[in-house]
Image: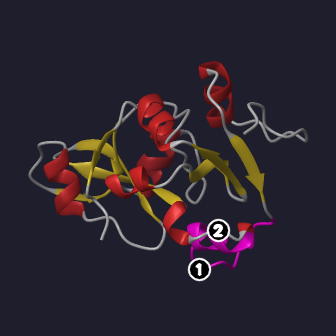
Amino acid sequence: MARKPKKGGQGTPATVALENAAVAFTVHAYEHDPAAASYGGEAAQALGIPAGRVFKTLVADVDGVLTVGVVPVAGQLDLKALAAAVGGKRAAMADPAAAERSSGYVLGGISPLGQRRALRTVVDDSALAHPTVYVSAGRRGLEVELSPADLIALTGARTAPIGR
């Protein structure tokens, strides 16, 4: 895998964070369709990869604390499981404006990497079954492929079964 994103102004805070960490990653660009029903599903289809290897980044409010859940696009985030994974009691999806403000990214392009404010993060443990996974590179139509171990290390994440 390459270490640098492709030329053409595709650098984002996520790819900069990956470059600074000197981990192996590959950037994959595709033509984003604004009418797509699912950003992650669109990425999997456009890139021709199984939906189980493409992970979406969701921001939830767990007991008043913004928390990131990273789950396969083929499923959903189990809010109770996310709360339990961080020792919380109650979780709900975060206000979209709060998620964008906190991360520095727009919805559909929120990356778990290079966020404006580092949030506690939980990656669904199914990621560990793959040699590499895909997550948003910080812009709609841009994914980054990296090892699950690097994703977990760079986000300071814990793993737990938070997808359903």
Judge whether 78 appears above or below 90 on screen. below
Quadrant housing residue 141: bottom right
**Quadrant into which the C terminus falls:** bottom left
Tell which circle, 1 or 2, labels the residue nearer the N-terminal end.
1
At label 1, the amino acid type is Ala
- For the point 56% across and 39% down, the residue is 104
Q: Secondary structure at mark 1?
A: loop
- The residue at which mark 1 appears reads as 37
**Quadrant into which the N terminus falls:** top right
Judge whether 108 appears above or below 151 on screen. below
Judge whether 119 appears above or below 52 on screen. above
Q: Looking at the picture, how far across and down is residue 92, in whole percent?
A: 25, 60
Using a 10 Å C-alpha cutoff, classify the residue at mark 1 as few (fewer than 14 neighbours), some (14 to 19) or many (20 or more).
few
- Residue 164's disc is none
The magenta stretch spans residue 44:
yes
- Residue 49's disc is 2
The image's colour scheme reads secondary structure
Q: Looking at the picture, how far across and down is residue 30, in whole percent?
A: 79, 62
Horizontal arrangement in the rendering, residue 24 relative to residue 60 (left or right) = right
The residue stretch that appears in magenta: 31-46
Q: Looking at the picture, how far across and down is residue 3, in whole percent?
A: 74, 31
At label 2, the amino acid type is Ile
Residue at the extreme right: 8
Q: Secondary structure at mark 2?
A: loop
Horizontal arrangement in the rendering, residue 6 relative to residue 47 (left or right) = right
